[in-house]
Every structure is written in C-alpha cells, then in structure tokens.
Amino acid sequence: MAKLTKESFIESLKEMNLLEIKELVDAMKEEFGVDPSSVAVAAPAAAAQEEAAGPSVVTVTLVNAGAAKINVIKVIKEITGLGLADSKAIADNGGAIKENISVDEANEIKAKLEEAGAEVEVK
C-alpha cells in the first residue's frame, strides 16, 4: 500500500461533506483512542496571531427556523447527526447547532441553514 501524504489526505478532506468528516473523526477516535479534534499543537506566535485575527472557535445558533421548517430540520439532522426528534426540537425552540467550531466551518453551516430558510447567528 502506498503511503498517504498529508497533501493527498487534505485534498481528500476537501472533497468530503461534513457528515463524512464526522464519520472519519469518529473512526479515528475508535481506532486510535484519540479525539483528533481536541488535539491542538500551535506555536505561541501562531496563537498570538490567531487572537489578533479574532475568535478561532465560534458557536452556530439557530434564531428562527423560518417558513420552510422541514428543510431546516433536515439540514440540522445532517449537520449534527442527531435524530429527527432532537433536530425538530432545535428547529422549534432555537439554540446551538454546533459549538466550538472553526469560523470556516461555522460559515459553511450558516450558509446551508440560511439556504434552507433559517435565520442563524454565529457567535
């Protein structure tokens, strides 16, 4: 088997949707006993640079599901991996969709939810 380079691995990740990436992270947790999303190694200079750029982690919050609530429930279910009842509860009551995620991922989630008709905040 050929060795997988980090460049080819990153290119593969770019082609995956959020659910596929979540499944990959879960498989890595199971195989290696380590949560890859919680491991962060950064030089102090890089951390200072990130702080100057703004928050590195944010929370996506549903403010209003809008008129097309069924579409919003489907998107919430896809993003979070929750069941239908839990996804519907979030759509009905609002609240956090995903917490402590990168700004880029938050913007992707926000775009998907807004496309489905929801009103979303990123904090």
Image: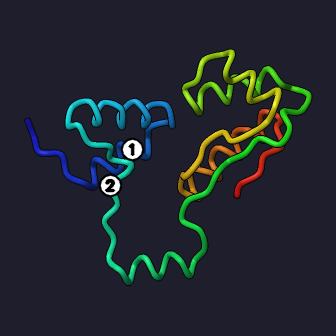
Decide which of tag 1 and tag 2 comes sooner along the chain. Answer: 1
Name the residue: 36% across, 37% down: 25
Q: In what quadrant of the picture does the N terminus appear?
A: top left
**Callout 2: few (<14), some (14-19), or many (20+) C-alpha neighbours within 10 Å?**
few
Q: Secondary structure at mark 2?
A: loop
Q: Residue at x 83, y 35 (%)?
A: 117
Task: Residue 45: give x, y in percent of width and height.
Answer: 38, 84
- Residue found 37% across the figure and 51% down from its top: 38
Q: Residue at the spot x=83%, y=24% of the render?
A: 69
Horizontal and vertical percent position of residue 62: 77, 41
Where residue 109 sits: x, y (%)?
64, 43
Residue kind at label 1, given as amino acid type: Leu
Q: Which mark is residue 13?
A: 1
Q: Which residue is mark 2?
A: 39
Mark 1 to mark 2: distance in Å?
18 Å
| Of 53 and 15, the residue lying toward us | 53
Q: Is residue 58 above or below residue 56?
A: above
- In screen coordinates, is 68 left or right of 18? right
